[in-house]
Image (spheres, rainbow, N blue to C red):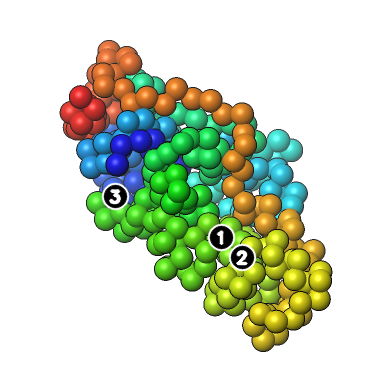
Amino acid sequence: MPGLMLLDTPSLYFRAFFGVPESVKAPDGTPVNAVRGLIDMIARLVADRRPDRLVCCFDADWRPAFRVEAIPSYKAHRVVEATASVDVEETPDTLGPQLPVIDAVLAAFGIARAELAGYEADDVIGTLAHNDPGPVDIVTGDRDLFQLVDDDREVRVLYTARGIRNLEILGEKEVSAKYGIPGRAYADYATLRGDPSDGLPGVPGVGEKTAAALVTRFGSLAGITEALDTGVTDGFPAGSRKKLEAARAYLGPAEMVCRVVTDLPVEVADGLPRVPADPETLVALADQWNLASPINRLLNVLV
């Protein structure tokens, strides 16, 4: 389905790092498994999906201040060093040095990238998807982006949990079938259930089934809050009303943390290059980092 393809690039290069052996190295012995894996992923996606446009989206801030202020535990378990200006994320020692190489290869190809200071790749993806008439394919291993699916505009998530060759394609119908919730209500559901991988505790005593039942019955967190405010008692699974009342102070900030931002000032030239922007640099990078094979594979599918 031609259209816009948005890549959750950190999700993909982490997957590449752990999926490709570290024995894949440059001539100087530096591992380049994440670089090689990411290039091959992009080549496979372009070959199989044939998007008209493609953007690699990045985290300018993997733990934005506005989310930490709302929920201090947000991604706190991943912090290895905190300074007055930045929190350093726990990253494998051999992955960090590969990130500048990824940047250089994408630039030499002329593949569009997008990021914005103070925000995560999720927010950049949310904004670009929201502003595009569709169709839009979002490639990610992050379930948080399920909230962006929109069958009317053909916004889908290509979920990488089973690999690039076995993508799970999710629209509203698929999200509904998977979680038993309205198709666009994943953020509401995740707020209630919580997400340990992001340090979000959820409402104590409210698990997946109760969260799904609440969101299905009331439609959204706003609907649940309105029911609490107006004294509605019908439709709350046993004991859940008291649990929600006790968690009132959590619900508002947590929803803001879970909700992807969709109105950022992000503009990007998102065409898919048919020839590299800087062929000489691309050849040099291929030689320096032992990337000739994946670079050629990507070149062959771009033409």
- Mark-to-mark CA distance, 1 and 3: 26 Å
Which circle marks residue 219 in the picture? Answer: 2
Q: Nearer the viewer, mark 2 or mark 1?
A: 2
Instruction: Establish if 224 lies above or below 105.
Output: below
Residue at position x 59%, y 31% in the image: 116
Along the viewing direction, whichever of 56 and 17 lies nearer the viewer? 56
Along the viewing direction, whichever of 180 and 242 lies nearer the viewer? 180
Confirm whether residue 169 shows in the render: yes
Residue at position x 62%, y 34% in the image: 264
Q: Quadrant of the N terminus?
A: top left
- Mark-to-mark CA distance, 2 and 3: 33 Å
Residue at position x 70%, y 61% in the image: 222
Task: Residue 171: give x, y in percent of width and height.
Answer: 41, 55
* In contact (CB < 8 Å): disc 2 and disc 1: yes
* In contact (CB < 8 Å): disc 2 and disc 3: no
**Amino acid type of the residue that numbered disc 2 sits on in the rendered structure:** Gly
Tag 1 residue:
185
272 relative to 65 in the view: left or right? left
Instruction: Establish if 145 lies above or below 58.
Output: below
Tag 3 residue:
164
Task: Residue 257: give x, y in percent of width and height.
Answer: 66, 52
Secondary structure beneath label 1? loop
177 relative to 225 in the view: left or right? left
Task: Residue 175: give x, y in percent of width and height.
Answer: 44, 62
Displayed quadrant of residue 107 = top left
Task: Residue 198: give x, y in percent of width and height.
Answer: 58, 57
Instruction: Establish if 72 lies above or below 101.
Output: below
Which of the two discs, 2 and 1, labels the residue nearer the N terminus? 1
Q: Nearer the viewer, mark 1 or mark 3?
A: 1
**Amino acid type of the residue that numbered disc 1 sits on in the rendered structure:** Ala
